[in-house]
Image: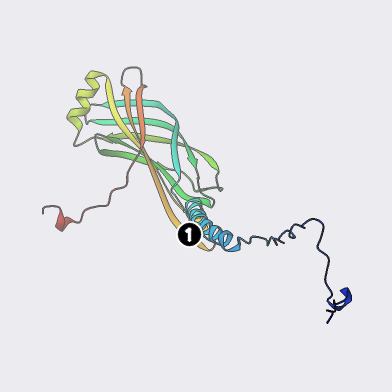
């Protein structure tokens, strides 16, 4: 019995490619990188640092402070020493510079200039009231005239200084007033002292040293001897 061969059309097939094809390249999708959380953290840290610094600078700028006093000119116009009784005639002229370092206006009630000899006050003079604008400067002239002021407790030292030809005195300039902040008035005060050595022969000032004086709180009498 003869065998029958199947025809080529009975089993379909795809022809093989002449050369193998490479696989398609993979598709890579790049997504944007969001650093929102990191930026928020940085901003938060910066705010923690910046805000306290700004508040501190604002408080420092707005915090009221006392005015600054400076003796620009101290002139001895007259000095006489009387032996019986021991007394002094003295005339001093002083020019004081008042500087207001605050953002508020300064209103001072008076400016007092006094003269002391070895801790004993001889007398004082007061100027009129005035006003210094914010960050402003004012100049005040005062003349202290004392005639026949007796030096009781320090009379022996005064005679000795007169013989030496040099008499040490102390001038104290003090200002009191207030700063106008909105509807409030904050009291302020400042004081400056000058140690002055006066030549008793030619009535000139040989030396003067000025420095800001420190206010001291008085000690109650019942605590002084404890």
Secondary structure beneath dot 1 equals strand
Q: Residue at x 34, y 34 (%)?
A: 147
Task: Give the residue pinned by disc 1.
Answer: 185
Quarter where residue 80 is shown:
top left
Which quadrant holds residue 2? bottom right
Question: How many numbered discs sit on the rendered protein?
Answer: 1
Q: Is residue 200 left or right of residue 55?
A: left
Q: Is residue 88 above or below residue 107?
A: above
Comparing 33 with 59, the one in front is 33
Q: Which quadrant of the figure has residue 1?
A: bottom right
Q: Position of residue 15 (x, y in %)?
A: 83, 65
Q: From the viewer's perspective, is 52 left or right of 91?
A: right
| Residue 151 shown left or right of residue 178 in the figure | left
In percent of the image, x 83 and y 71: which residue is there? 13
Query: In the rendered view, would you say 7 is above or below 122?
Result: below
Location of residue 141 with respect to 161 vertically, above or below: below
Q: Residue furthest top?
A: 202
Q: Is residue 166 above or below residue 178?
A: above
* x 89%, y 76%: residue: 9
Q: Residue at x 31, y 21 (%)?
A: 200
């Amino acid at each position: 019995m003869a065998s029958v061969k199947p025809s080529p059309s009975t089993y379909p097939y795809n022809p093989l490619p002449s050369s193998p094809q490479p696989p398609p390249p993979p598709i890579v999708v790049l997504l944007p990188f969001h650093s929102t959380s990191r930026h928020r953290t940085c901003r938060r840290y910066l705010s923690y640092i910046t805000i306290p610094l700004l508040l501190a600078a604002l408080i420092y700028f707005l915090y009221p402070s006392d005015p600054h006093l400076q003796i620009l000119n101290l002139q001895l116009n007259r000095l006489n020493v009387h032996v019986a009784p021991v007394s002094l005639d003295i005339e001093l002229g002083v020019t004081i510079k008042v500087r207001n370092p605050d953002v508020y206006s300064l209103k001072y009630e008076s400016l007092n200039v006094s003269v002391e000899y070895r801790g004993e006050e001889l007398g004082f003079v007061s100027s009129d009231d005035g006003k210094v604008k914010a960050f402003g400067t004012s100049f005040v002239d005062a003349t202290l005239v004392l005639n026949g002021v007796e030096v009781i407790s320090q009379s022996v030292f005064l005679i000795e200084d007169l013989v030496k030809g040099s008499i040490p005195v102390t001038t104290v300039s003090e200002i009191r007033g207030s700063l106008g902040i909105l509807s409030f008035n904050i009291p302020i005060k400042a004081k400056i002292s000058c140690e002055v050595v006066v030549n008793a022969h030619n009535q000139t000032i040989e030396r003067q040293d000025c420095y800001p004086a420190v206010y001291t709180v008085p000690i109650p009498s019942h605590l002084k001897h404890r």
